[in-house]
Amino acid sequence: MRIRKHLRKSLKESQGPAIKTFDKVKAGDTGTVFNGTEVTIISKGPAELFRGYEGYDILEELAYEEEETVDSLFPECVLVEQNGKEVVYSYGSDGVQVEQNEVRVRQISFDFIDDGVDENDLISRIQDAMDVAEITIVGGPAVGDTSWSKEEYGL
């Protein structure tokens, strides 16, 4: 049995690119502005560090509207090169984000209640779900021969 279309769509939509945390961002990284434009990170720090650069006045206005200081509202900012200009943005979904490009091999393990499920069908469903999520399976999935009764398992 294949994953239903609406479930496939919702699973796919929930899978976004992994975003670097601010502490992992460094000069030279390529980021994306909220509108999809690619930029190169020059420097990072609190907003106040970028006073005088294009975009700072917008951050300052937003902070004023919220009755906050620019640094308290925007402690994580990046200075970027965009179309030959140096522009400051907040870091995050409303400013600039840098995708994490480190690929790792991870493992998912779970126990399931076998009420007569067809093992091949189960494995097929798991593979379908991983395909939808665009996750490459490099080992398994497999069903082991270890089993317990519900009582032995604690259910």
Image (cartoon, grey):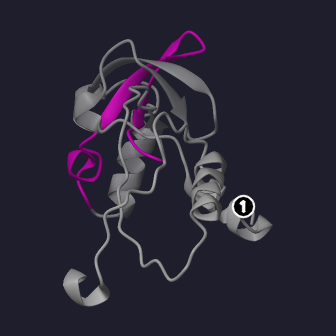
Q: Position of residue 137 (x, y in %)?
A: 52, 39
* Rendered image quadrant of residue 148: bottom left
Q: Viewer-proximal residue, 131 or 126? A: 126
Q: Over which residues does the magenta segment extend? A: 68-93
74 on left or right of 39: left
- In this picture, is 146 found above or below 38? below
Query: Is disc 1 placed on a helix, strand or loop?
Result: helix
- Quadrant containing the C terminus in the rendered view: bottom left
Q: Residue at x 55, y 41 (%)?
A: 135
57 on left or right of 76: right
5 on left or right of 141: right
* Crowd rating for badge 1 (residues with CA inside 10 Å; few <14, some 14–19, many 20+): few
- In this picture, is 97 found above or below 38? below
Q: Position of residue 49 (x, y in %)?
A: 23, 28
Q: Position of residue 144 (x, y in %)?
A: 38, 56
* Rendered image quadrant of residue 14: bottom right
Residue under label 1, please give it.
Answer: 9
Q: Viewer-proximal residue, 117 or 80? A: 117
> Is residue 97 in the magenta section?
no
Q: Position of residue 115 (x, y in %)?
A: 50, 83
* Rendered image quadrant of residue 83: top right
